[in-house]
């Protein structure tokens, strides 16, 4: 006991002899530790950001508004793009469209090895498998997959032909499943990422778009589950939910009989631009974000749907129900 007391007295005396120097040393050590932690965090954060430079990205729905801007953004960052779409005319026009505005230092027409366009029906799995083999023969490494193709209907459930529902599900869900199924082994090898262009309809119902919502709910649920299976293998799954966007997408909306809808649609809030949406999608992939809701209205919808569903349903019905009066 006496020896313990002696040690304690010695420690107290030592602290009394040089209190300032001890305190200064402790502060310096604390500051040094903090600086090391902060520096390490910054390094890790910088290292964790993804890059598109010298990487190969597969983009579905590439001839559409958001798809075209995704192509532009990746090419501008020094990446290679494999553009997929069913719209043959749109694909043929894509290189010129990306070259004419002067936003790219090396337009695709002057460097065609960085943009490769393929017409494909992504709802046909056998054709997707065949195209995959063709792509792999030219591009052994695949780094990113952007599941961006989509189709919408604006029609009541009661009046709509069931074939319209099947078509919407095929394009919005199965096209992404087919592409992800064939390219996932490559993404695991490259520790790449899958980006899903979802929608507010992926977490909140929309009047007159029952199976558009069904397809987006299914898409989001499927890829959240897939994320849990592949995240530990180094593959990110980024789900991005834009709001109303000013593209040709809604102009191609299907009606009750599968033909294009001619009446105007209702919107909530302001239109977003395809340029902004594409920029946010690329940022989400670079920063490894799991889930991103882009528009303020989308964020409010997420909150209301989660915490006040009756209020959300009332507002949604009041805003969108008038669309179907013209059926």
Image (tube, grey):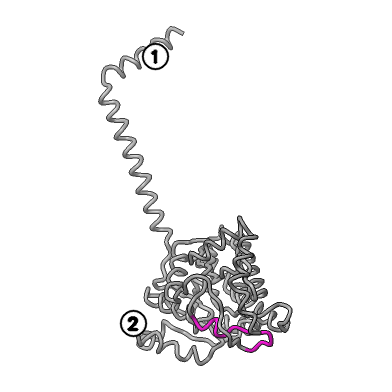
The residue identified by callout 1 is 8
Name the one closer to the observer, 211 or 80. Answer: 211
Q: Viewed as shown, does residue 30 lie left or right of 116? A: left
Secondary structure under badge 1?
A: helix
Magenta-tinted stretch: 247-259
Q: In the picture shown, does residue 222 fall above or below 90?
A: above
Rendering coords of residue 99 (x, y %)? 37, 86
Prevailing SS of the magenta stretch:
loop
| Residue at (34, 85) in percent of width and height | 101
Q: Please give left or right for residue 320 compared with residue 111 in the image.
A: right
Q: Position of residue 275 (x, y in %)?
A: 42, 76
Q: Residue furthest top?
A: 2
Where is residue 28, by image quadrant? top left
> Closer to the N terminus: mark 2 or mark 1?
1
User: How far across and down, in percent of the image, does residue 197 sit?
Assistant: 54, 72
Which of the 4 quarters of the picture holds residue 265?
bottom right
- In magenta segment, residue 309: no
**Residue under numbered circle 2:** 106
Identify the residue shown where x is 49% and y is 61%. 289
Q: Is residue 60 visible?
A: yes
Q: Is residue 138 visible?
A: no
Determine the secondary structure under disc 2: loop
Which quadrant holds residue 79? bottom left
Q: Badge 1 local density, few (<14 within 10 Å), some, or many (20+)? A: few
Q: Quadrant of the C terminus?
A: bottom right
Is residue 258 a member of the stretch shown in magenta?
yes
Q: How far is disc 2 from disc 1 in space, using C-alphas?
A: 74 Å
């Amino acid at each position: 006991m006496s020896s313990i007391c002696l040690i304690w007295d010695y420690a107290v005396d030592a602290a009394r002899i040089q209190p300032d120097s001890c305190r200064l040393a402790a502060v310096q050590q604390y500051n040094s530790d903090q600086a090391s932690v902060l520096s390490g965090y910054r390094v890790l954060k910088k290292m964790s950001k993804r890059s598109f430079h010298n990487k190969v990205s597969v983009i579905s729905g590439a001839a559409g508004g958001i798809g075209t801007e995704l192509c532009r953004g990746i090419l501008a960052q020094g990446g290679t793009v494999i553009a997929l779409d069913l719209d043959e005319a749109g694909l043929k026009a894509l290189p010129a469209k990306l070259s004419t505005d002067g936003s790219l230092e090396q337009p695709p027409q002057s460097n065609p090895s960085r943009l490769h366009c393929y017409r494909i029906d992504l709802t046909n799995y056998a054709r997707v498998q065949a195209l995959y083999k063709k792509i792999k023969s030219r591009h052994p490494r695949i780094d990113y997959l952007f599941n961006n193709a989509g189709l919408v209907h604006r029609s009541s459930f009661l009046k709509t032909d069931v074939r319209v529902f099947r078509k919407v599900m095929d394009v919005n869900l199965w096209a992404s499943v087919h592409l992800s199924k064939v390219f996932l082994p490559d993404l695991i090898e490259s520790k790449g990422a899958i980006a899903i262009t979802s929608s507010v309809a992926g977490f909140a119902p929309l009047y007159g778009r029952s199976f558009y919502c069904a397809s987006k709910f299914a898409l989001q649920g499927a890829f959240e589950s897939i994320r849990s299976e592949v995240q530990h293998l180094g593959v990110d799954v980024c789900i991005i939910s834009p709001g109303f966007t000013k593209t040709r997408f809604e102009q191609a909306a299907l009606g009750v009989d599968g033909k294009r809808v001619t009446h105007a649609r209702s919107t909530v809030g302001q239109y977003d631009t395809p340029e902004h949406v594409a920029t946010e999608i690329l940022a989400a992939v670079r920063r490894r974000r799991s889930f991103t809701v882009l528009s303020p209205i989308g964020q409010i919808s997420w909150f209301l749907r989660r915490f006040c569903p009756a209020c959300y349903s009332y507002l949604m019905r009041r805003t969108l129900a008038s669309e179907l009066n013209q059926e």
